[in-house]
Image (spheres, coloured by chain):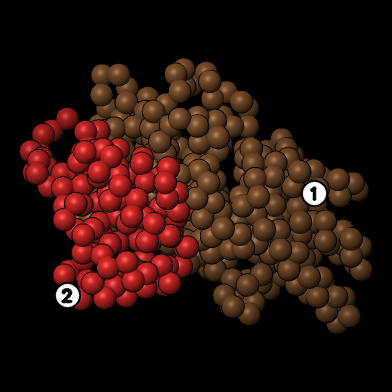
Amino acid sequence: MKNFGYTLVEERLIDYDKNERRVLDYLKQYEPSVNQCVACGSCTATCPAGDYSGFNIREVHTFLRRGEIHHLKTEIRKCMFCGKCQLVCPRGVNMRNLILSLHSAIERLGI
Amino acid sequence: MDGRVIIIGGGMAGLSAAISLSEMGIAVTVLEKEPVTGGHVRNWDRLFPNRRKSGEVISFLNEKLDGIDIRFKANITGIRRNGDFTVTLDDHKEIHGNAILLATGYDLFPAVKKEEYGYDIYDKVITSAELEEMFRLGTMAEFIHTPPRRIAFVHCVGSRDEKVGNLYCSKVCCVTGVKQAIEMKELYPKSEIFNFYMDLRMFDRHFEEMYFEAQKDWGINFIRGRVSECSENADKSVVVKLEDTLTGRPMKITVDLLVLLVGMVPRPGTEALALMLGIPVSDDRFLLPADEHTQANSSNPEGVFLAGAVKGPACITSTIADGRAAAMQVAVFLNNKSSQA
């Protein structure tokens, strides 16, 4: 086949064969409603912390699902546990326990 | 009532129309090109959204076919209009009718046209129809020797794609992908399952609930992005490349089985029949009814009626309903005709 020289820039690539999925596996165990997200963004749109800190829980979660957790630790500290995200979630994701579980995942897995 | 209706096609649309007409006391001849009736539904194992056996739907129709004239392996060579209709078959038999109902359905999109997905090139790239057949025949273990670690489904193969000339949505592939993902997870509980989609169009009753169930109870992963290309590893696993559009990043993932959710395309044979009868063909190459909203079963040449996926992608539920609706329109037409005579 003709080689058109198409390559992916390594640092932007999500390599699902190599990435870190232990946090997600932990989360699936302690807050299984994490699976119910459809990435609608209602949580982020309603997040008061997001207004001041740029916290985007929808994005954090999407990256986490792909095993991309580089900013996870610093990002989830921005949550104030007000629970507005949980009030608006159309799929019934237990957001507060999700973030609490992320904190404990980071601690227990030593990330 | 006087008259005979010629129904071309013995799938869901043709059979449900034939049964309704017959129940109204109208004589019917069904022309089926295969040696059996049931159409594409025969190739299914279980149906969305409740995963009941497809055979149950087929038996429901088959049990009502007593006394209906069905011609199997019927190949139409010509249709003459002489006030009424005379259909000629390749065995030179002629069938006379006062109305004609086209219920010839659809073909599956030929997946080889999307060469970048590697169908017919890589061993572990199959279509959703082939997967369904393996479910039905119980032959999965012959094809998959060791439990797959990862299975992925590609949505919109041959649909919503200008590059293959099909701008339309095939409707049923989204929910088929969800159904088959659940069924694969059931068969291989340790596997990770992915669906790569552009949008998930859960348009009908209990579809969205099935999507929810797939996420909640089965842990199926849904990743938004259209697969750009695939390649094969030495161990026959398939490397899939796409953009994960929700993170805005390119993504690479290796899977043991890639299932292409192929859409529906118009049948070339239908176009030939449309030409003989003077039925207009729409820009999507499916047939155009007299009015898409209000006269969806009638066609502009008088006495010609349409039902089912011959007018574009449709699921079983709406196809059966459409066949019955067409039967009603045909009956009204014949009734008016005989009262005028």
Instruction: Identify the hue of chain A.
Output: red
Crowd class of label 1 (few under 14; some 14 to 19; many from 20; radius 10 Å): some
Subunit bearing disc 2: A
Provide residue A54's location: percent of width, then percent of height.
17, 69
Identify residue type, mark 1: Leu
Name the side, left or right, on which B11 lies relative to A24: right
Q: Which chain is depicted brown?
A: B
The vertical placement of A33 against B71, above or below, is: below
Q: Viewer-proximal residue, B94 or A2? A: A2
Residue at 45% across / 49% down in the picture?
A32
Q: CA distance from mark 1 to mark 2?
A: 63 Å
The mark found on residue B61 in the picture is 1
Foreground mark, 1 or 2? Answer: 2
Identify residue type, mark 2: Tyr
- Which quadrant would residue B80 be assigned to in this image? bottom right
Residue labelled with disc 2: A52
Subunit bearing disc 1: B
Provide residue B324's location: percent of width, then percent of height.
75, 64
Both labels 1 and 2 in a single chain: no
Mark 2 residue element: helix
Residue at 71% across / 58% down in the picture?
B320
Q: Viewer-proximal residue, B332 or B190? A: B190
Callouts 1 and 2 close, C-beta under 8 Å: no
On the question of residue B89 being in view, the answer is no
Name the side, left or right, on which B38 lies relative to B229: right
Provide residue B125's location: percent of width, then percent of height.
38, 32
Name the side, left or right, on which B169 lies relative to B208: left
Q: Viewer-proximal residue, A86 or B339? A: A86
